[in-house]
Image (tube, grey):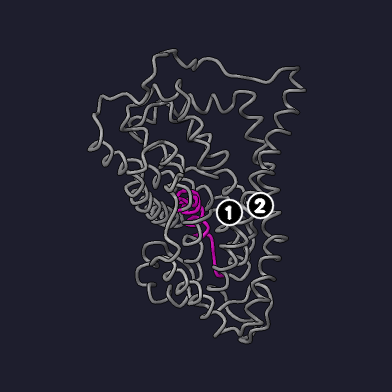
Amino acid sequence: MNTTNMKKVYSLETLIFIVVFFGLFGYLGSKMGLPNMMNTLMNTAYALLLDTVFYIMAISVIAGAIGSIFTEFGVIAVINSLLAPLMKPIFGLPGASAIGVMATFLSDNPAILTLADDPSFRRYFKKYQLPALTNLGTGFGMGLIIITFMIGLSPKDGGTFVLPAFIGLIGAVIGSIVSVRIMLHFTKKEFDLEEEAYEGNDKSIMRSDMRIVREGSVASRAMNALLDGGKQGVNLGFEIIPGVLIICTLVMMFTNSPTNGVFTGAAYEGVGLLPAIGSKLDFILKPLFGFTTAECISVPITALGAAGAAIGLIPGLVASGAATANDIAVFTAMCMCFSGYLSTHVAMMSVLKFPKLTGKSILSHTIGGLCSGISAHLIFTLVSML
């Protein structure tokens, strides 16, 4: 009998869980009243499903279709060719890793795992470079969807968020470079620098001058690419539902305030705990990220676990005036760079067969994510002065 994943019926973690679970909901219930807490919990989840999840899914479908047709007709291959010479001097990784950047930017963090499992891809890497693919992929996960989402928001004072979104993209790139470089610093101490990542006998070379396309005419290939990419967007939209409804609902309940100072059980009500904590840390957060209000801290905190849930918080902040252009730049950078890494790094490092380096990977990406937000704020401030 396999007992690897078995624990005693009663353990310390059971006690800790009970204390934390009933402590959190006990606090909410004591502030809101039990009936109001339950009504707000359900109403917020339902409102998020209708107002946010389906909107993100629609964006995912369009972004997936664009990414798929770009791949089918060689646009991604051209971009990859342009990026490849930059990877070694900037990230310290072989040029082939640019493919991983594009794959995760168009989809999500785990997309890089499929590439890492391909012998024709692994052969370009030294063994010490392979664990850093987790940090590289996470730094660009859901990038296209996040940027498209930010651009689609409407500022309260008119205009667009196009410039802040692209400044955020630059910040995310800086954060990913920091994350990968720190991770490589750790892995160089663990492995022989000349040890190859690929240990098989087949040394066939990946054809960089060729690409795989669908069968059929140009028109049928275009239509199939659009539909296949759209289907991937639908799948991603369904996958983010648990994260948005569970994480985002709880974060909102700890972030928002009651309606006109009175709890009614309506959607999006909360006890305002995170802003209170944020206000105590404002002397740190303001110079680092330039947040307009303390409520903004809820976005990067949520992005630690799920980028989809994090961007679901932003429309409400923008509509209320709690978030402005600078915040959008920082949100874009941190949502894209973090990409819910706390919920994916353990599994990704396990798939890559480097579980003992998970802690170092998480530490590296924590620093990288913070650097992404700081960089976005500084760049936005500099651009605003010009």
The majority secondary structure of the magenta stretch comes to: helix
Give amino acid for label 1: Gly
**Lower position in the chain sequence, tag 1 or tag 2:** 2
Disc 1, disc 2: CB below 8 Å? yes
Task: Locate residue 158, reporting x and y percent.
Answer: 64, 61
Per the model, the C-alpha gap separating discs 1 and 2 is 8 Å
- Up the image or down, 261 lies above or below 238; here it is below
Label 2 CA crowd tier, 10 Å (few <14, some 14–19, many 20+): many
Residue 99 position in % (x across, y down): 49, 29
Q: Secondary structure at mark 2?
A: helix
* Amino acid type at image mark 2: Ile
Q: Which residues are magenta?
A: 322-342
Q: Position of residue 198 (x, y in %)?
A: 37, 23
Q: Nearer the viewer, residue 147 or 227?
A: 227
Q: Which mark is residue 56?
A: 2
Please indicate, yes or no, whether residue 171 appears anywhere in the rendered image.
no
**In front of the other: 295 or 49:** 49
Q: In terms of image quadrants, where is residue 311?
A: bottom right
Q: Is residue 315 above or below residue 295?
A: above
Q: How many marks?
A: 2
In the rendered image, residue 246, in percent from the top left (x then y), is placed at 59, 62
Residue 325 lies within the magenta run: yes
Specify the label residue 308 is tagged with: 1
Q: Which image quadrant is residue 11 in?
A: bottom left
